[in-house]
Image: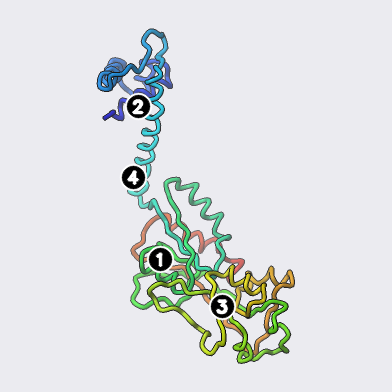
Amino acid sequence: MIPLDALQALDSIDRKGTFAAAAEELHRVPSALTYTIKKLEEQLNIKLFDRNKQRAKLTPTGKLLLERGRDILQQVRQLEEQAKRVETGWETELRIVVDTILPVEPLWPTLKTLLAEQPWLNIQLIEEALSGSWEALIGQRADLIIGVTGDEPAGGHWQKQALGQMKMNIYCGSQHPAASLPSPINREQLKAFTHIVVSDSARNLPHRNVGLLGLNQVLSVPNMEQKYQALTHGLGISHLPEHLAKPGIAQGLLKKLAVDATPFPQMLFMSWHKNHTGQAGKWLRETITEKKIFGKILS
């Protein structure tokens, strides 16, 4: 096995050009450095330096060993840095669920800053819907869930932070039959149309099916983006967040339906385990709150 101090000596001699200069950089005496290199040559039965030159010049074999050795030294330095980060509370992985009701786009600048400041941190973004977001937290597949409603399962050991209210309205495609209904529209009239819903991504928790009873036909899609597309293609009617419907309204693809009851705004939260004390998660939560990352979407 090649000792790390031998690879460090090899690297320093190559960069500094002489054994004496390398010894000074490594705070060792030249004779100790010479012994380290000689011992490595004997151990591997190879020649690392051309000793006929005034300047320490690597042989082709020495160059190959140094090239691979520098990769190892870099990995060791990274490992040391990671260990120091973990010791000070900075986790090496952060798993974030963003519920499909919220767009990820407002989060990108914040994640860019976090990744730049913590080069050893790996971030995993996960999309879930409805109870699936809570299930990811309960099953420890996520460290932080963003955009969930307040109807969390009972008995959990987590904390919540309100993000704001999401305004939702009922929409249909501009050419859909519901678009020609006279206002105000009775909700009973809407039951005759196909309703487009986002499928609950929970695997084990009971699925949320609020408002689905009594409907003649339902089209289930995996996320909000596909719900928007289905609406613009005239497949049915559905609730949409105002920010998501706005482009479709501007382009004449969607119509807001004036129903006889004002829809209630939905309060959204972010939540995390009480025992999650990682500095990266804490920094992200505080930044989302202080900078009101989703302030243009939530009121």
Residue at the (44%, 78%) spot, across then down: 207
Mark 2 vs 4: CB contact within 8 A: no
Q: Which corner quadrant holds the C terminus?
A: bottom right
Q: Earlier in the sequence, mark 2 or mark 3?
A: 2
Q: Earlier in the sequence, mark 2 or mark 4?
A: 2
At label 1, the amino acid type is Trp
In this rendered view, identify the residue nearer to me: 299 or 2: 2
At label 4, the amino acid type is Ala
Q: Which mark is residue 219?
A: 3
Mark 4 vs 1: CB contact within 8 A: no
Q: CA distance from mark 2 to mark 1?
A: 43 Å
At label 3, the amino acid type is Leu
Q: Which mark is residue 83?
A: 4
Q: CA distance from mark 3 to mark 1?
A: 32 Å
Of marks 2 and 4, the one in the foreground: 2
- Tag 1 residue: 272
